[in-house]
Image (cartoon, rainbow, N blue to C red):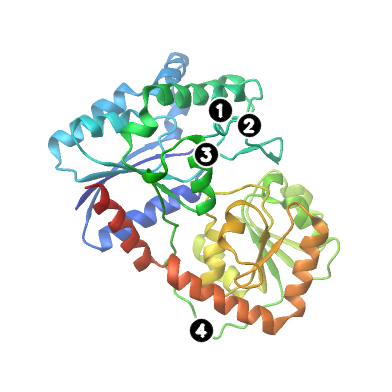
Amino acid sequence: MKILQAHNYYQQSGGEDTVVAQERQLLENNGHEVIPFYKNNEEITTYSRLDKVKLVKETTWSKKTYREIDTIFKSEKIDICHVHNTLPLISPSIYYACKKHKVPVIQTLHNYRLICTNGLLMRDGKICEDCLGRSAYGAISKKCYRNSAMQTYVVARMLQKNKQMGTWNKQVNAYLCLTEMAKQKFIEHGIPEEKITVKPNFLDVELKKDIEKKDYLLFAGRLTATKGIELIINLANRINYPIKVIGDGDMKEALSITPKVELLGRKSHKETIELMRDAKAILFPTLLYEGMPMTIIEAFALKTPIIATRIGAAESMINHLHTGLLFDYNSGNDFLAKVSFCLGNKDIMAQITKNAYLVYQEKYTASKNYEMLLDIYNSVL
């Protein structure tokens, strides 16, 4: 099978980029040919003022992308197009070029962008569903995207114009959601249920047996308020136990003066996995719904206990006291209670991590993911 893989990279690399690379490798390892169609938002830094003005229309429907995809289809016999991110350089015009050449389109919904201009369903540090089932133009006055009314307008225009054109419901053959929770949100917003399939992300990691866990808790991620860093600081001030922190962000300084916290900065994926494997527990106190946190899958695979917020993707993925521990949303007291429980109940936590590893084997391995992906591809061909 020959697959056109389309992805618009953000200026700051994230989890989506990792998933795209892993999925490409997975397909190629199984004998398929992947034709990449990638754009990078670094390109925008070279734009003139006029180019940036044109981007308002191009984000909604890019003539350039349409021509480029049309050219690819004239020279390559593509079986299927799998789109990941289109914002802002690729745009939904890619779907129309595929339709012209009768090539089925799969769209992975890594975030909530079809509902919310910032893709997070969050505003002012709190969960926000104001645009769920409504017009995205309501986000403009609130400056939901990058705290800019103009940039929010560009994204809202893209969403609403394409909704009016029938793009979301008519041009895409199938959508892939990462969790059941996300699927329900998109159904509420108007995406046809029959077009949505839940396919999680996956992880291919080698587990070293009989790892003796070391005496530290670990957080790995962006050091921002929305990732629950204030809860990490609150915990560190109340518990006599080391906390290692991987990552960077605007709350780095606040963490640097917090007792028991060791800032490790940015680490490679390999280094992060090793630290996660050795940790007594992984902390995931996010305030976001999230898409599908790889951190949770990594914890399951590495047999390291995970303590996460009872919300969104984390609540959908973790069965409390069976595959991990969940604490009440933004509750420092409950977070402390669950961490204390983890540290004080070695045998229970050992059983929980065994359960979590079985779930990893059942749902999140590369082989299982390939089976799911191939079934989805075949269903639209």
Q: Earlier in the sequence, mark 2 or mark 4?
A: 2
Measured Cα–Cα span from mark 4 to mark 3: 44 Å
At label 4, the amino acid type is Lys
* Residue 219: quarter of image: bottom right
Q: Which mark is residue 66?
A: none
Q: Seen in the image, is 113 located left or right of residue 225?
A: left
Q: Seen in the image, is 186 located left or right of residue 2?
A: right
Q: Seen in the image, is 279 located left or right of residue 178?
A: right
Secondary structure type for disc 3: helix
Which numbered disc, 1 or 4, marks the residue closer to the eye? 1
Measured Cα–Cα span from mark 1 to mark 4: 51 Å
* Residue 310: quarter of image: bottom right
> Quick check: marks 2 and 1 in contact, CB under 8 Å?
yes
Say if 180 sits above or below 161 in the image.
below
> Quick check: marks 2 and 4 in contact, CB under 8 Å?
no
Residue lying at 32% horizontally and 60% vertically, measured from the top left: 26
Measured Cα–Cα span from mark 2 to mark 1: 7 Å
> Quick check: marks 2 and 3 in contact, CB under 8 Å?
no
Q: Earlier in the sequence, mark 1 or mark 4?
A: 1
Disc 3 crowd rating (10 Å Cα; few below 14, some 14-19, many 20+) is some
Residue lying at 61% horizontally and 48% vertically, measured from the top left: 289
Secondary structure type for disc 1: loop
- Expressed as whole percent of the image width and height from the top left, the position of residue 339 reads 75, 68
Which residue is the site of mark 1?
Answer: 134
Q: Which mark is residue 130?
A: 2
Disc 4 crowd rating (10 Å Cα; few below 14, some 14-19, many 20+) is few
Q: Which mark is residue 188?
A: 3
Which residue is the site of mark 4?
Answer: 209
Which numbered disc, 2 or 3, marks the residue closer to the eye? 3
The answer to whether one can see residue 114 in this image is no
